Image (spheres, rainbow, N blue to C red):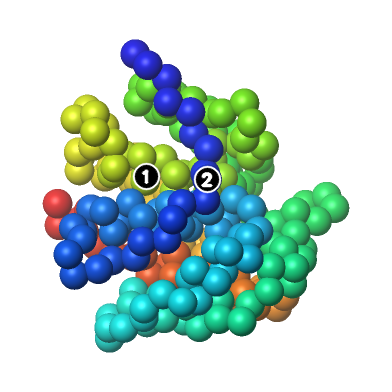
Amino acid sequence: MSQTQIQPQAQPLKFEKPDEGEETARADLYGLLATLLYAPPPQALLDTIGSAQAQGEGVLERAWAELVAACRGAQAEPVRAEYEQLFVGVGKPEVMLYGSYYLSGFLMEKPLVELRDDLARLGLQRSETMVESEDHLAALCEVMRYLIASDDPVHANLATQKSFFAAHMQPWVGECCRALAAHPSTSFYRPVAALAQAFFDVEMQAFDMA
């Protein structure tokens, strides 16, 4: 089985449009969250999001509008400083983005081993250039983007997406988003957390009905 490497990368922003399918919109949003959570966004991405359309009355649409508003006029350097304060820092990050931490209380524990086993079964492996472990929220969003967008029928099916999300994201992503949104130093990343929370809630509801 061929091995596909996992590494969140900046993607051209393509939020849902009337002529785009729901699956494309899902993949795009997972890709955007992966990009925003993996590293501080460059100025070009902030400007692109800030110039995007924002309309609709649903929870997800309102969360998207808040992120668009936050990106209008945002400067990359303060956003980078906030990212490093929240997610990097010296010693333990102020906000953890790793599944093992929420599931076991420690990093690099059994949940990561189980995740790696599932990734191997999917023919996926961590890129050598990726500095974060596979249970980083950005990496998991990138896996979901791949599972939705892949042309491989073994991967691009709802059952595989549902199984992966239920096992490796659903038990902890809500707690992670709430921790990020509530942190007193969060400014730009508060609407990112709100968008992620709203999107994950929609995903959970959709998977429950599948």
Residue 157 lies, in percent from the top left, at 20, 38
Of residue 69 and residue 182, the one placed in the foreground of this image is 69
Farthest-out residue, top: 1
Left/right placement of residue 39 relative to residue 78 reads: left
Q: Tell me: residue 177, above or below residue 210.
A: below
Left/right placement of residue 78 relative to residue 30 reads: right
Of residue 73 and residue 168, the one placed in the foreground of this image is 73
Quarter-of-image position of residue 80: bottom right
Left/right placement of residue 96 relative to residue 193 reads: right
Q: Which of pointers 1 and 2 lies earlier in the amino acid sequence?
A: 2
User: How many C-alpha atoms fall within 10 Å of the one at disc 1: few (<14), some, or many (≥20)?
Assistant: many
The amino acid beneath tag 2 is: Gln
How many marks overall? Answer: 2
Residue 119 lies, in percent from the top left, at 42, 28
Of residue 36 and residue 173, the one placed in the foreground of this image is 36
Quarter-of-image position of residue 129: top right
Q: Of the numbered discs in the image, which one, if any, rests on residue 144?
A: 1
The amino acid beneath tag 1 is: Met
Residue found 67% across the figure and 37% down from its top? 131
Secondary structure beneath dot 1 equals helix
Residue 147 lies, in percent from the top left, at 31, 39
Q: Is residue 181 visible?
A: no
Q: Are marks 1 and 2 in contact (CB under 8 Å)?
A: no
Disc 2: which residue:
9
Q: CA distance from mark 1 to mark 2?
A: 14 Å
